[in-house]
Amino acid sequence: MSGLLGKLFGTGAGGKGAGKGPSPQEAIQRLRETEEMLSKKQEFLEKKIEQELAAARKHGTKNKRAALQALKRKKRYEKQLAQIDGTLSTIEFQREALENANTNTEVLKNMGFAAKAMKAAHDNMDIDKVDELMQDIAEQQELADEISTAISKPVGFGEEFDEDELMAELEELEQEELDKNLLEISGPETVPLPNVPSISIPSKPDLRDLAAGNTDILLEIAS
């Protein structure tokens, strides 16, 4: 491709500027200008073809010679148009390839720049020092965890209790709770009845006593 570019822009061996070829940006710009020029030529030829076709229809059978001349010119314009179409396709392909090459070149330059920067950064690093630093960080982290654990433990200042006494009290509370649950399971407690009044209720009189009393009263009245 470099040889083709050299021929196109006159920078081949022995030519002007043979020491240094055009930059990709310059070549791309010139190809775009050429595409624009050919596109304008293409539009011109299309209009000429329409004009010659209209002239051929106009003359028709009235002036066959003029009609044939118009058709011949139309054929020449069509041939030129086909050549321009092929040239435009070639230039477009070349421009796209050059743009891709330019993009790849820029990408490679940036990757090389980044690689140099990474190398410069690593030059200031010693793997042994990195290992020592990581060990120091791990030790400090372990120390920090131990301090946090120690701080988080509850501390009772001046409060010392007998464990046996606390366990006995806990067992007593558990027994009370157990008794309470058993009472709830056995059913509700019996409600006490009200007290019976202490006043004596007179007994029912005997009918025979009443009859004997009435007889005595009647005998006293009769006497």
Image: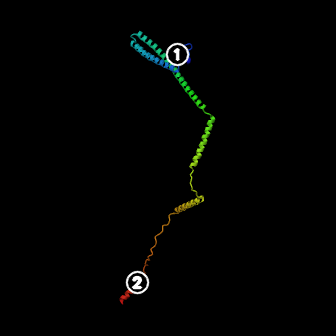
For mark 1, give the secondary structure. helix
Who is closer to the viewer here, 115 or 27?
115
Q: At 36% across and 89% down in the image, what residue appears? A: 222
Tell me, for residue 139, which label it has, or none: none
User: Which residue sits furthest front?
Assistant: 158
**Residue 68's quadrant in the figure?**
top left
Residue 27 to residue 189: above or below: above
Residue 52 to residue 194: above or below: above
User: In x, y percent, where is residue 73?
Assistant: 44, 12
Nearer to us of marks 1 and 2 is 1
Who is closer to the viewer here, 151 or 41?
151
User: In x, y percent, where is residue 26?
Assistant: 51, 19
For mark 2, give the secondary structure. helix
Does label 1 or label 2 sit earlier along the sequence? 1
Residue 87 to residue 139: above or below: above
Tell me, for residue 9, which label it has, or none: 1
- The residues tagged by marks 1 and 2 sit, at their Cα atoms, a distance apart of 166 Å
User: In x, y percent, where is residue 198?
Assistant: 45, 75
Q: At 41% across and 10% down in the image, what residue appears? A: 66
**Residue 202's quadrant in the figure?**
bottom left
Q: Residues within 10 Å of mark 2 (few under 14, many from 20)?
A: few
Tell me, for residue 211, which label it has, or none: 2
Q: At 57% across and 48% down in the image, what residue appears? A: 151
Image quadrant in which the C terminus is located: bottom left
Give the residue type that dot 1 points to: Phe
